[in-house]
Amino acid sequence: MCKIINSSRNMDVISIKDFSKKKIENFLVESEKMFEYLKNNTVPKVMQDKILGTLFFEPSTRTRLSFTSAMYKLGGQVLGFGSTESSSISKGENLTDTIKVVENYCDLFTIRHPEEGAARYIADITDKPVINCGDGGNQHPTQTILDLYSIQKLKGKIEGLNVALLGDLKHARVMKSLASALCMFKANLRLISPVGLEIGPNTLNDLKKFNTDIFETNNIKEGLKNVDVIYVCRIQKERFDDVYDAQRLQREFRLKLDHLTNINKDLIILHALPKITEISPEIDNTPYAKYFEQVYYGIPVRMAILNMVVE
Ligand code: NCD
């Protein structure tokens, strides 16, 4: 059976920065237990009397469906919406009222919202546990736990690895969350972005506090020297003022096969997905591409998160 890790009544998962390294390690250990339960078909139905509310005010495929699948596998049930058009938000209902209503129908929430800070706000107005599935360009903590789990699983460790984060580092919540966690786990960072889409001085200063080796560049080839992991994210077009600028960068800033000459043969390439044009399609067929394996790990990791939040 699952071990009870957190005995507090209401644990929220809002920002990866709210957790100690020890706590994140607990998430990874519990995720591995779920991985084994899934493999052996012995998943404990610990959510049998629980209902998960999935309120997604922004599009999602993996995060919403993997939480749904994780909940079903643990014996629980799911309700909610995947777009605001199908809820009373489209009639003008405000966020507070929506939460105050839906909290009557479910035992915990998974929330995705376009505004930074929305998940924290919701956690403040409800007594039900809240899991942030992305708030604007700010945080995506469950993706980060899944990314750490994937790196640990595929590389056997995190500490000391050279990890390149490549793409739109200014707007991607996936990258901001992951960068903090990687520094906490003592990985070295290569931050590779187009000009103008750097991670930004505030985040960079936060990262530097962990005293790991951090190197910023706008040149893909230069940034990929001696890396163990390349983590790619798409240009976050929906967060641009100028959509043509986003489209130009989608064409210009891409990981191509010829970037992978002279690389470490054990290299792995990860991506939170969806991928659009930022990875050339031939790379999908190389042994380095691990993003579809990474997707599978979303199930055990989210099962572990659900269990730990409720316990
Ligand atoms: C990411 C997101 O929504 O932030 N997707 C995901 O959750 N797997 C990445 C992205 O949209 O680029």
Image (tube, rainbow, N blue to C red):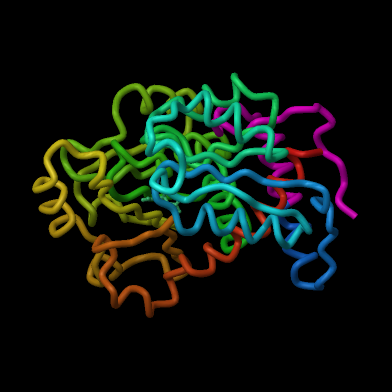
| Towards the viewer: 151 or 130 | 130
Q: Would residue 139 appear left or right of 103 to someone viewing this image? A: left
| Residue at the far top in the pictured view | 124
Q: Is residue 9 magenta?
A: yes
* x 54%, y 37%: residue: 132
The image position of residue 49, as x and y in percent, is 82, 48
On screen, residue 310 versus residue 104, left or right, reads: right
Tell me which corner region of the image, top left, top right, bottom left or bottom right, holds residue 44.
Answer: bottom right
Q: Position of residue 308 (x, y in %)?
A: 75, 41
**Vertical position of residue 107 compared to residue 207: above or below:** below
Residue at 30 percent across and 38 percent down: it is 171
Residue 311 in the image, given as x and y percentages of width and height? 81, 38
Q: Is residue 20 magenta?
A: yes
Quarter of the image with the N terminus is bottom right
Query: Is residue 301 found left or right of 248 in the rendered image?
Result: right
Seen at 26% across and 60% down, the residue is 278
Taking the view exactly as shown, the residue that stands out farthest to the front is 91
Q: Is residue 299 left or right of residue 249?
A: right
Q: Residue at x 54, y 68 (%)?
A: 293
Depth check: 225 or 246 in front?
246
Q: How many marks?
A: 0
Q: Please, is residue 260 above or below residue 45 in the view?
A: below
Q: Position of residue 28 (x, y in %)?
A: 69, 49
Instruction: Look at the image and give the residue range highlighted in magenta.
Output: 1-30
